[in-house]
Amino acid sequence: MAPSRRCAAALAAATVVLAFPAASLADEARDALIVETVLRIEGFDLQGSTKAQAAVGRYLKSNWAGERYLDLIERFSLKEEAPGVLRLALEKSDTPMGAEAASLLVTLGAGNLLINTLRGEDDPKAVQAAVAISHAGAPALVAELPKILADQSRAVAVRSSALAALYGKHPAKQAELLATVKAGKLAKDLRQTASEILMLSRDPEIRKEAKSLFAVGEGNFPPVAELVKRKGIATNGKQLFATKTCLVCHQAGGVGINFGPGLSEIGDKLDKKALYQAILEPSAGISMGFEGWEVTLKDKSTLVGIVVETDENLTVTMIGGAKRTINKGEISTRTKLKQSLMYPGLHQLMTPGELVDLVEYLSSLRKGG
Ligand code: HEC
């Protein structure tokens, strides 16, 4: 259907919905219908219709974090809804929807809410605020992070989160962090977080330098043939799965984001030897459908992630779960990566004993178990 006709049809539908309260529809369904309709009408004047305004207000109240929640607020610039958007940006800071909420706060001109939370006394919220600020990316917000880092009176958890928000994402920033560590200018209590950020860099040069800097070597890891003979403690492994960043990309035992393959039944698919290999050398055998791609757009921006393709579009799912759909016309190049999107060197965040526990846990994950 041509856009003008779709618009006319939506307008007609809106007139019907707004003018004739349909007694047969439950109020909530009717509000939802009005919401869908006003979202479809280009340039709809919400202020001009008290009925639509009331329906939108009711919808937002009973659908916090619902499907259309952010769409509505963005479309009609509903600044007064900023507190609800803030809550979403904080509580869901590690989901794509939370990331969207963080960006929307900036669009609404309410970025200061994130700054206040970051500066506030509630530490767990301040940790989330730092993550949200890294999603939003607005320079005025990002400029707050170094102040937190420098403030020794703040909890280590808050400063670590600020460190990851500031340096975690881009190899260029990671190179800065590396230089800071080398110059001995990083606070001691942030070294652990810094080593994790740097050893998980996409840039192999940074990983290599981090490895020697933090003095972790392949050397103290026994070969796989040795490791498979050991028996680990699965309950320890379950905790390691969460703390050693596996859950950033995998779901297992009810936690995690499915960016890479789900691992809830991985014990049925891979034996211990294969599990060790998957962790020690992720690029040796990349699971089908989970290959990484680097997509460069005509505006020179680059996306790295897993790609799903339709006739017209390409959807790139990035690490962390955020998705971006682009029209194929916007793409200038795309290259399949030889390396797995799973970082090599994850085992260096663990002792050999911990790795054995982790594999024991993974191998216990079976159908019906
Ligand atoms: C940055 C994202 C990321 C992180 C972090 C990550 N993985 Fe992966 N993982 C992937 C992707 C993508 C694949 C699929 C590609 C491949 O096989 O290399 C994968 C594959 C696997 C496989 C093979 C699955 C199969 O079905 O064959 C296992 C096992 C695995 N990961 C375990 C782990 C463990 C344990 C951790 C934590 C120590 C971890 N991963 C951390 C992204 C990640």
Image: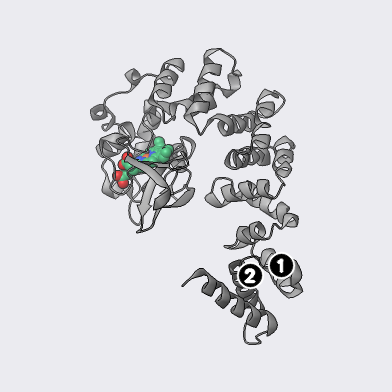
Q: Give the residue at the far bottom of this rendering.
A: 23
On the image, the x and y values in percent for residue 19 come to 69, 83
The reply to whether dot 2 and dot 1 touch (C-beta < 8 Å) is yes
Q: Is residue 39 left or right of residue 220?
A: right
Residue type marked 2: Val
Q: Secondary structure at mark 2?
A: helix
On the image, the x and y values in percent for residue 37 come to 60, 72
On the image, the x and y values in percent for residue 332 come to 38, 43
On the image, the x and y values in percent for residue 97 come to 56, 52
Q: Give the residue at the far top of this rendering.
A: 183
Q: Is residue 56 left or right of residue 341?
A: right
Residue 294 in sight in this render: yes
Which residue position holds label 2?
Answer: 38
Residue type marked 1: Leu
Here the colouring is one colour
Residue 362 vs residue 70, the one in the foreground: 70
Q: Secondary structure at mark 1?
A: helix
- Image point (65%, 31%), residue name: 145
- Image point (68%, 85%), residue name: 20
Quadrant in which ligand 1 is drawn = top left
Q: Residues within 10 Å of mark 1 (few under 14, many from 20)?
A: some
Q: CA distance from mark 2 to mark 1?
A: 8 Å
Which residue position holds label 1?
Answer: 46
- Image point (58%, 68%), residue name: 40
> In the picture, residue 142 is in which quadrant?
top right
Residue 264 in sight in this render: no
